[in-house]
Image (cartoon, helix red, strand yellow):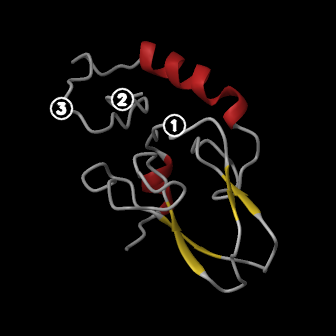
Amino acid sequence: MATTDETAVENLVPAVASCAPTKVTGLVEGDVKYWCRCGLSANQPWCDGKHKGTGFTPLKWTVPETKDEYYLCNCKQTKNPPLCNGAHKCAEAEAKERQEHCKRGDGHKADCKLCTSCGWKPDF
């Protein structure tokens, strides 16, 4: 899976996959993982390729140290990806606010996979 320029991705708004982190165990220092940045993956917190066509790419993450557990972000609002920083506590309310004030004028067509302006997805 390819990664892209960080500045291109940071201007996009991801979907909130869930408002709780995923506890991940069994990671070993040096493991390479691909964290979902778009919020669409059915295999959270890992990328499953559903970002295709959205402008998002996964974050390539090399596990920094072997630990019993890591808590990885699923709300996609963390300032320290892929690690959870507690942003999920406000993520749902902030996402709904963004969606209510989205500048996109089409009302989010049902065939839209992800609005990268506000983070809307059909099943949110």
Query: Where in the figure is residue 27, as x and y percent of width and height?
Result: 69, 76
**Which residue, given by chain and number where applicable, does mark 2 sit on?**
123
Mark 2, other Cα within 10 Å: few <14 / some 14–19 / many ≥20: few
Judged left or right of residue 23, residue 59 is: left
Spot the residue most to the right. 68
Name of the residue lying farthest toward the bottom? 30
Quadrant into which the C terminus falls: top left
Q: Is tag 2's residue or tag 1's residue first in the polypeptide sequence?
A: 1
Q: Residue furthest top?
A: 100
Q: Secondary structure at mark 1?
A: loop
Horizontal relation, residue 9 to residue 21: left or right? left
Residue 16 disc label:
1
Residue receiving disc 3: 111
* Of marks 3 and 2, the one in the foreground: 2
Residue 22 higher or lower than 47, as above or below: above
Give the residue type at disc 2: Asp
Q: Amino acid at mark 1?
A: Val
SS category of the residue bearing label 2: loop
**Could you tell me which residue is drawn at 64 percent across and 57 percent down?**
81
Residue 23: name its quadrant: bottom right
- Residue 110 vertical position relative to residue 6 in the rendered view, above or below: above
Nearer the N terminus, badge 3 or badge 1?
A: 1
Circle 3 packing at 10 Å, graded few (<14), some (14-19), many (20+), is: few
The percent position of residue 85, horizontal first and vertical second, equals: 76, 47
Say which element carries label 3.
Answer: loop
Real-space CA distance between mark 3 and mark 1, rounded to the nearest whole angstrom: 18 Å
Res. 101 in view: no
Q: Is residue 95 left or right of residue 42?
A: right
Density class for disc 1 (Cα within 10 Å; few <14, some 14-19, many ≥20) is: many
Note whether 65 is above or below 94 in the view shown.
Answer: below
Question: Which residue is located at x 38 percent, y 61 percent?
Answer: 48
